[in-house]
Image (cartoon, rainbow, N blue to C red):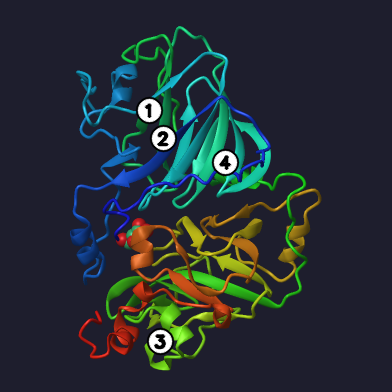
Amino acid sequence: MQRSAGLYGSLIVDVAEGEKEPFEYDGEFNLLLSDWWHKSVHEQEVGLSSNPFRWINEPQSLLINGRGQYNCSLASRYNSSAALPECSLGGGEQWAPNVLKVLPNKTYRLRIASTTSLASLNLAIGGHNVTVVEADGNYVQPFSTTDVDIYSGETYSVLFTTNQNPDENYWISVGVRGRLPQTPQALALVNYLPNHASKFPTSPPPVTPQWDDYNRSKAFSNRIQGLEGTTPPPPADYDRRIMLLNTQNTIDGLTVWAINNVSLSFPPTPYLGALKYGIKAAFDQTPPPDTFPDWYDIMSPPANPNATTGNAIYTLDFNSTVDVILQNANTLQPNDSEIHPWHMHGHNFWVLGYGDGKFQRGDEKLFEKAGRRPPLKNTAVIFPFGWTALRFVADNPGAWPFHCHIEPHLHMGMGVVIAEGVEFLADVPRETLSCGLTGMMFSGNGEEGHN
Ligand SMILES: O=C1O[C@H]([C@@H](O)CO)C(O)=C1O
C-alpha cells in the first residue's frame, strides 16, 4: 500500500542519441494522475485485513501532478445545480490546478501516467482532439480521439495541436470510469499565451464518459495497435499457455482475491535471493496451477468461496514464448465483476485480444484477426466478465511480479510471480538479500536480517 501513500513518480526515458522518434512536437508536459484518500494507508490496510472486511471505498480527490481539490469544484461554475460549491481561488494555492502554458498553432506532447491506487480514468482536453502515439513506452499506430482511457499502471503519450480560438483557455479534465464515480473530476488548465491563466475557460470541462459504458472502453482498448513496422508477436508455439482465473474469495473470513484459487502472500525471503542460492525453505516449491477447472462458472459468485494462500511461483523456460489468458469472473456479490489492470514487471507483452465471457479453445483464432497488430504493453486491463490474452517471451532473467495494479487488490492477493533464467544472473544485489532467510545467511549471525 506504499504507492497509495504517495510513493511514486515518473521517469522519462529519452530516445538514444541519434535516434529519432516517429513523430514531432514543439513542447511537452508531464501529467501524473493519481487518486487520494483522507483515511491513512495504515487504516486502509487494517480495514482490508480485518474480519469483517472494510473496503477503502472511492477516493476523496483525483490529483493531476499532485494537485486536486476537496469540498469544492472548479467545474461547478458551469453547472449551478452542481452538488459542490465552486472553489474560490485567490492565486498561488497549493491545490490550484496545474497550468500548461502553450502558444497557438503548435503541437505538444503530453506524457500521461496513472499511478492510481484504485481509479480507472478518462482524460480529455476541451475543444481539442488528441493523437495517441505511445503506450507503456512502445510506439503505437497513431490515432485521433476525443479522450483517452487510462488504467492504473499505464502510460501514454498523446499529441495535441493548439488550433482552437487563441483568445480562450481550455480545461483538461480527468474523471473516473469502471466504478460508480463518487469523486469530482480533476482539472488542469491549457493556457493559450498571452492570455492570463486566471481567465476562466468559457466552455465547461469535458464530461467523463458514462462509467459503465464498457463497450466504449473496449472500443478504445481495441484501437491501441502496434506501430506499423514494429516487431509482431512471435507465432504461438504453445510452449506454454497459462490460464489465470481471477476470483474474489474468502479465507478464514477475510475477503481476498485469488488466481486459480491461490491468493498471493509474499514470503519474508525475497524470491531472487532464494532462487539464486537455492533456499528451498523460502517459499512453497510446488508450482501453482496452470489452469482452472473447465466447469467453473464465471458468471456467478464462486460456488465454494474458499481459497488458499500461497507463495509458489511459475517457472518459465528461458526464451520460451508464453501465452497468458487472464479470465475475469463474478465477485462474491451476484451480478458483479470488476475491471483489473494487470501489470507485468520485467517484460513487455503483446496484447493479443480481449473477449467477453469465458475463453474457449478456438478463441485464439480471434488473435489473428486480419490486419490487427497487437500492441506491446506492460499493463493490460481485463473487462468485467471477460478475458484478455497476452503473449510474451520469457527472456529476462529474474523473478517478476505480475499483478493487478489496483493497490488494495494486490494487498488482498491478486497477483502471481513468474521466474526465468535465474541461473544466468551474474549477481544479486546485496540490498535485496537483507530480509528473511537470505538476511540470516548473509549477516552471519542473523541479527541484521529483518523479517
Ligand atoms: O476488492 C474489492 O472489495 C470491494 C467489494 O467487492 C467488497 O466490499 C470492491 O469494490 C473491491 O474492488
Q: Name the quarter where the N terminus is drawn.
A: bottom left
Q: Does any atom of ligand 1 lie closer than 8 Å to the CB of label 1?
A: no
Q: Do the residues labelled 1 and 2 touch (CB within 8 Å)?
A: yes
Per the image, label 2 sits on a secondary structure element best described as: strand
Q: Residue 216 got which mark?
A: 4
Q: Which of marks 4 and 1 is nearer the N terminus?
A: 1
Q: Is residue 64 above or below residue 366?
A: above
Give left or right: position of 46 versus 300. Answer: left
Residue kind at label 3, given as amino acid type: Phe
Residue flagged by tag 4: what amino acid is it?
Arg
Label for residue 208? none
Q: Between 228 and 427, which is closer to the camera in this rendering?
A: 427
Residues under labels 3 and 2: Cα distance?
A: 42 Å
Compare marks 1 and 2 and give the one earlier in the sequence: 2
Crowd tier of the residue under label 2, counting other residues whose Cα lies within 10 Å: few below 14, some 14–19, many 20 or above:
many
- Residue positioned most to the right: 370
**Mark seen at residue 174:** 2
Tell me the CA gap for discs 1 and 3.
47 Å
* Image-quadrant location for residue 294: bottom right
Residue bearing mark 3: 283
Alpha carbon separation for disc pair 2 and 4:
16 Å
Instruction: Indicate which disc, 3 or 2, sits on the residue closer to the N terminus.
Output: 2
**Amino acid found under the numbered disc labelled 2:** Val
